[in-house]
Image (cartoon, rainbow, N blue to C red):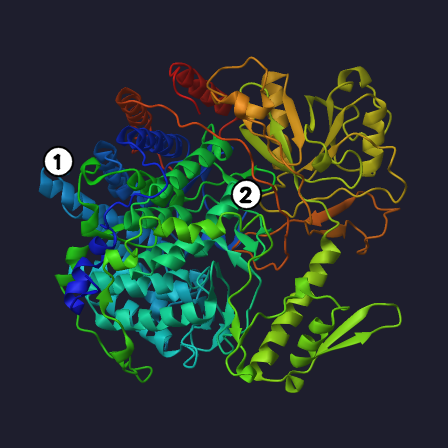
Amino acid sequence: MGWLTLTLAGMRSILLSFILSVAVLRTGQAAMTKEEKAQLRSQVLEMFDHAYGNYMTHAYPADELMPLTCRGRIRGQEPSRGDVDDALGKFSLTLIDTLDTLVVLNKTKLFEEAVRKVINDVNLDNDIVVSVFETNIRVLGGLLGGHSLAIMLKESGERMDWYNDELLHMAKELGYKLLPAFNTTSGLPYPRVNLKFGIRRPEARTGTETDTCTACAGTLILEFAALSRFTGISIFEEYARKALDFLWEKRQRSSNLVGVTINIHTGDWVRKDSGVGAGIDSYYEYLLKAYVLLGDDNYLKRFNTHYDAIMRYISQPPLLLDVHIHKPMLTARTWMDSLLAFFPGLQVLKGDIRPAIETHEMLYQVIKKHNFLPEAFTTDFRVHWAQHPLRPEFAESTYFLYKATGDPYYLEVGKTLIDNLNKYARVPCGFAAVKDVRTGSHEDRMDSFFLAEMFKYLYLLFSEREDLIFDIEDYIFTTEAHLLPLSLSTANQTKPKKNTTTQYTELDDSNFDWSCPNTQILFRNDPMYAQSIREPLKNVVDKTCPRSSSRVDETSGGGNRPPLRARDFMASNSEHLDILKKMGVSLIHLKDGRVQLVQHANQAASSVDAEDGLRFMQEMIELSSQQQKEQQLPPRAVQIVSHPFYGRVVLTAGPAQFGMDLSKNVAGARGFVARTEPYSGCSDVTNAESIKGKIALMQRGQCMFAEKARNVQKSGAIGGIVIDDNDGSSSDTAPLFQMAGDGKNTDDITIPMLFLFSKEGNIILDAIQEYQEVEVLLSDKAKDRATIFKGKIIPNYIIDSNLEGETGEQKPSENNSQKQILEETSIHQDSITDSEDDASVASQPGLTSSSNSEDSSSLEEDSGSLESSEFNDKNIKDSEDHLQESMETLEDPKVNKWDKKRVQPIESILADWKEDIEAFELMEKDEL
């Protein structure tokens, strides 16, 4: 049939349904039966109930749930996490973000009750500074998505007959509160705004910022345009359009790329690197989706221009590497962040399937190696930033690829995501973010996007049209997965206004292909097409980093040559030395035997060679720095394995440079804990009989860590945990400690020693107070529960039925980079003699951190697996009824829910866990 050519209007109206309605392909992957898909849908529903129910029970009306301590996160009442907290505005963020998810999952009764709560309880006039970007995509998008589906339910006669656009009125109120942020000469919004006082006023405490990220300014058009078209008030769409116009005008004209950060007043690029991940990602997404939703051809023209540049410079299949906007042939960094996982899904909407399959498969191999996608990983697939805050972007791309290909392979990918969430992130009060994918330790965090996006995409992945109560293809997904109706394309259209701040440049569209590919051409009449693309990437993570695409050598008549990479360089290789000379790099042999490299770009054979030389030098600097740090130790894990925890609670622990190396001891050290007397552990232990054969708890301070270890080891302890004496300290907000020795030989210390901050340590101390007998496992990373309890008699809901197949063996972490910092003394790394306490080590920051510390560890794939739980309609109904009962108890209009911090004592938390356990015991066939 060739290419199915469409008019612009026709393409816009059916773009999504055409791309996402391709006939199912029969590949080598066995098709999943309807019964299996139904079981997985039921499992997703149970997981959602667990997360949502715990938020409503333990956290509402707080913005987010803290799943480890079973309480709500309220801005200003918890230690600041920096920019991450800018998403919190005391407006019950998680509830608003979850509204349309409830309808997608056919929980319309809960949806109706949630809408009433939002209308009655949520206050948008708080004196608090919030992120314009996060508030737009999560809160404004959540209100509009909820309004869209409330209208749908009302018109269908199902529910919501009382609804009178209350959510839309709240969205309009919020829209007006965000408008002051656009008070700049460029039209780019300030990154933050005070919900009560706006910008610049003294009481606003904001308005002095000069920079914003491209995605922050360029991810507004869907929500703002929808608000304009729902209300007929054009100003919202006009402001968002003006910001997009300005970003387009400021693109680098020769490369057609945009940078990560821009000055909102001058339009100068502050960070000139360009990619498809953090800081830029949703800018590209919204250009394409704005065309689909709003019907303005200019958005598609701009997207096509940028996409061509991305595929020309950034895409090095299967990798997507940042480049410099002025020198796009020059790679800006050698690692990728996890937010780029959305890009294969966007490529599906574009109709460019092959690179989408390649990148998605590469990401899936990383996930199989680490159980989750690290926040950042290197080009040779080592961990760069170890956190995983339960991001949904990979699930999003998995859903779109399945809809585009019908390949059952992607259903198996989705099943893996479900299994990993249940095995490694599920805790009694919800799902906890993973603080370190290498150890499996948890962070007391469950972001609102987990409920807004993850469960929505997973449920849709295993659903057919008849399983949904409305036609999902009548809607477009925002970047937060909120649903906006495509009918808005013809509602209250606003006339585009020319950007008066810059001269608008019309595009010559003669080089654009205004057509959708026919599926027979897309998949080449080959049912194995998608599998043939994936096959070469099956083992890409376990092998050496794949080569980047070959580059054209300008000086050799167009011949291809791979660039020399720093990791491959050998000073004794004459061919390598010739390549260095061509790149303008000189090699100097120093008297001490070392080799020094110096580059002179003007001595390079060509401009391309000069760029290769600069990249080579940058890689060499990073490689040298990395090698210097490789001897440092990664974080460790303390896992509580006794009743009622059963391995579900994992605490991030600092390692020691002495004692048992847990990375070389697969079993770790397991035992009951006992408090040392004296608690400091700095003198002879007076309760030696109590700690003999146990893991000794000590408080930090008064002597060296090594001295504490020797004292408890002499008393027969099999391990030691040192708890920070700084009350309130937490691994969530403080750099990880690495306990150094005392400057003497520490070979006599043979027991494992770990360090816990105050918050994590108190979890163990409180458990002792409640249960007396508390057993823990000290290891290099959290162990699968099947491994922990193999051969032991415990409740059957704790362990998978395929226990015999679990090995749980892990290979030790390597090459972790950390920085030693001595307390109360100057910085040294040789030895410690007179320090009052021991050395600390900085941990890796999250994706939002400004730190540049690098991590480069790798782990072998966990051999464990989790069988799908069996569910039935009665279980789901009982779960919903329980949720209903728990939420009704929250209704008390006389109580000001913000007056008192919602903190539960350990007794209450453990009582809640007991209730969960009793409920699970009633479900004999269900397995967590």
In the figure, residue 130 lies in which quadrant? bottom left
User: Which residue is drawn at the image coordinates 33% and 66% (left, top)?
Assistant: 180
The residue shown at (45%, 60%) is 277
Q: 734 or 79: nearer the eye?
A: 734
- Left or right of residue 843, residue 354 in this image: left
Tell me the residue that label 2 is attached to: 369
Mark 2 and mark 1 residues within 8 Å of each other at the beta carbon: no
Q: Residues within 10 Å of mark 2 (few under 14, many from 20)?
A: many
Q: Is residue 432 visible?
A: yes
Residue nearer the viewer, 208 or 270 = 270
- Please give left or right for residue 492 compared with residue 87 in the image: left
Q: Position of residue 312 (x, y in %)?
A: 43, 71
**In the image, is residue 25 above or below residue 498?**
above
Q: What element carries label 2?
A: helix
Specify the quadrant of the image occupied by residue 514: bottom left
Whether residue 163 appears in this view of the structure is: no
Callout 1 amino acid: Glu
Callout 1: helix, strand or loop?
loop
Image coordinates for residue 559, horizontal then vertical, percent: 52, 77
Instruction: Work out whether residue 786 or residue 653 is closer to the camera in this orientation and state it.
Output: 786
Figure quadrant of the C terminus: top left
